[in-house]
Amino acid sequence: MGRLILLGLAVLILVWLVRRALHSRKGGAAQPPGTPGELVSCAHCGVHLPRAEARAADTGLYCSEEHARLGPRRP
Ligand SMILES: [Zn+2]
């Protein structure tokens, strides 16, 4: 049983190493390190966050489900 766990861990580490190698080769040159990608601002509170982390709603992009539910901030 212990051998199976060790084997599983070895496979996981191998997969992680391969994925890391592939990822660094693909994105390393195109994007300088530390660049989080395109930034968008929350329509409710105005906080800036990467587009990948933003919640899209009919009325705009939001930083969280809560702000997406509340909608754009009224003046
Ligand atoms: Zn927000």
Image: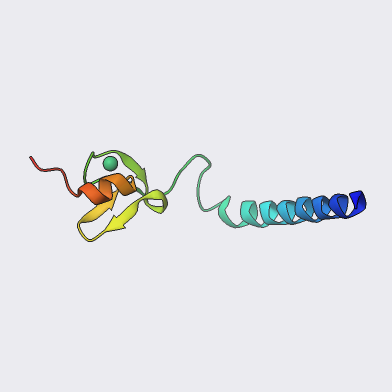
Report the coloring of the rendering. Answer: rainbow
Residue 45 in sight from this viewpoint = yes
Residue 53 coordinates in the image, percent (x, y): 40, 49
Query: Quadrant location of ligand 1?
Result: top left
Residue at point 67%, 51% (across, down): 20
Residue 36 coordinates in the image, percent (x, y): 45, 44
Residue at point 41%, 53% (across, down): 52
Residue 26 coordinates in the image, percent (x, y): 60, 57
* Location of the C terminus (image quadrant): top left
Using residue 56 as the reference point, say whether residue 24 is left or right of it.
Answer: right
Image quadrant assignment for residue 74: top left
- Report the front residue among 15 and 37: 15
Using residue 23 as the reference point, say whether residue 40 is left or right of it.
Answer: left
63 in relation to 21, above or below: above
Residue at point 80%, 56% (across, down): 11
Which residue lies most toward the front here?
1
Residue at point 21%, 43% (across, down): 44
62 in relation to 15, above or below: above
Residue 41 in sight from this viewpoint = no
Image quadrant assignment for residue 4: bottom right
